[in-house]
């Protein structure tokens, strides 16, 4: 099934005083990357979230933002950093003496000093929080997949129309190829007839003509390339229509397009005909348009 690389997904879970919200933005990228930003002292979940996102994203870059808040008493322990508090208190007293100032060193002032009060999370609560974060991330990925699948349907329809156009051009080239051989045979016959003396045996002339035609056919024959190109079209269409396929297909489609382009280049270089050359320019332009669309597929 085709999925676009771009999309947006969001999910939120609230349970036992804990709230987790996850936002995922996916954009085009040649490889699979995941950038994770966690807010709310849950950095311990980063690796697990990254592995989960990459396992479901295929190609593309995913920016994941996670917010965690809790009013659950089990999730935090506030401790006094006594050595730091003493140093602040001593320093403030020293300021009073040095600058001959007065003023109360209040509880509010001391509590507001950095690192005087430290909030920690017990290790025993991390497993439950991690499970909640992963559950919410899964839901956000489901939401993202819905958007990517919807866009993928649009991509599939557009690419199939372009592929229809390529097949039409290829059939025109297939139809023209024998005509080119016939035209070249007629020209060769005229030239050989003009070159050989009329007294020369017709059999010898026919032998030379057959040899020249064989050389031309060997150099300019495109039948094999047309067969392979048509096979690539069939394989490409089969891949994008496979609704039972869940894994990413972007890389495979990219490879098939490269093979299409390779055969098109060979046909263009071998075909000794202005009409086929014009068709090849149109064909290569269509293949390039499909290649650009494939870059959007996961």
Image (spheres, grey):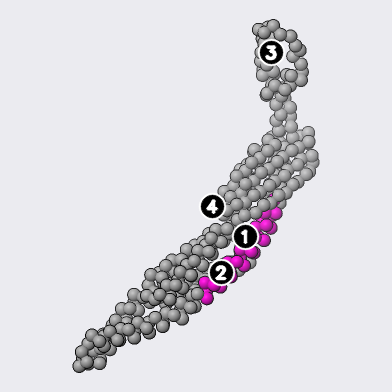
Mark 4 burial class by Cα count in 10 Å: few <14, some 14-19, many 20+: few
> Closer to the N terminus: mark 2 or mark 1?
1
How far apart in space, not on screen, are marks 3 and 4 (Cα)? Answer: 55 Å
Q: Which residues are magenta?
A: 140-168
Mark 2 burial class by Cα count in 10 Å: few <14, some 14-19, many 20+: some
Mark 1 burial class by Cα count in 10 Å: few <14, some 14-19, many 20+: many
How far apart in space, not on screen, are marks 1 and 4 (Cα)? Answer: 15 Å
Q: Is residue 129 above or below residue 218?
A: above
> Mark 3 highlights which residue?
92
Residue 31 image label: 4
Q: Nearer the viewer, residue 8 or 277?
A: 277
Residue 272, x across and y down, in percent: 37, 75
Q: Residue at x 74, y 9 (%)?
A: 102
> Closer to the N terminus: mark 1 or mark 4?
1
Q: Is residue 123 left or right of residue 185?
A: right
Q: Indicate yes or no whether the magenta region holds residue 1.
A: no
> Mark 1 highlights which residue?
3
Q: Is residue 142 left or right of residue 250?
A: right
Judging from the image, what secondary structure is the residue with disc 2 in? helix
């Amino acid at each position: 099934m085709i999925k676009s690389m771009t999309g947006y997904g969001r999910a939120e879970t609230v349970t036992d005083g804990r709230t987790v919200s996850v936002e995922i933005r996916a954009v085009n990228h040649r490889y699979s990357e995941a950038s994770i930003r966690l807010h709310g002292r849950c950095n311990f979940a980063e690796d697990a979230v990254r592995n989960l996102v990459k396992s479901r994203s295929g190609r593309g870059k995913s920016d994941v933002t996670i917010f965690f808040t809790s009013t659950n008493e089990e999730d935090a322990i506030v401790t006094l950093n006594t050595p730091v508090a003493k140093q602040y208190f001593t320093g403030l007293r020293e300021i009073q003496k040095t600058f001959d100032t007065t003023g109360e060193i209040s509880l509010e002032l001391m509590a507001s000093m950095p690192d005087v009060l430290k909030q920690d999370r017990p290790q025993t609560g991390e497993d439950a929080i991690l499970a909640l974060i992963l559950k919410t991330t899964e839901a956000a990925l489901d939401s993202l997949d819905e958007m990517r699948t919807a866009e993928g349907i649009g991509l599939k329809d557009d690419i199939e129309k372009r592929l229809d156009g390529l097949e039409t051009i290829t059939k025109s080239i297939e139809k023209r190829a024998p005509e080119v051989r016939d035209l070249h045979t007629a020209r060769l016959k005229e030239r050989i007839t003009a070159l050989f003396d009329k007294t020369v045996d017709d059999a010898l002339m026919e032998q030379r003509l057959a040899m020249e035609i064989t050389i031309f056919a060997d150099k300019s024959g495109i039948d094999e390339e047309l067969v392979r190109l048509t096979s690539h079209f069939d394989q490409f269409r089969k891949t994008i229509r496979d609704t039972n396929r869940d894994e990413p297909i972007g890389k495979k489609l990219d490879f098939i397009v490269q093979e299409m382009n390779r055969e098109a280049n060979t046909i263009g270089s071998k075909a000794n005909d202005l009409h086929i050359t014009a068709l090849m320019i149109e064909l290569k332009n269509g293949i390039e348009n499909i290649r650009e669309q494939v870059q959007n597929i996961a």
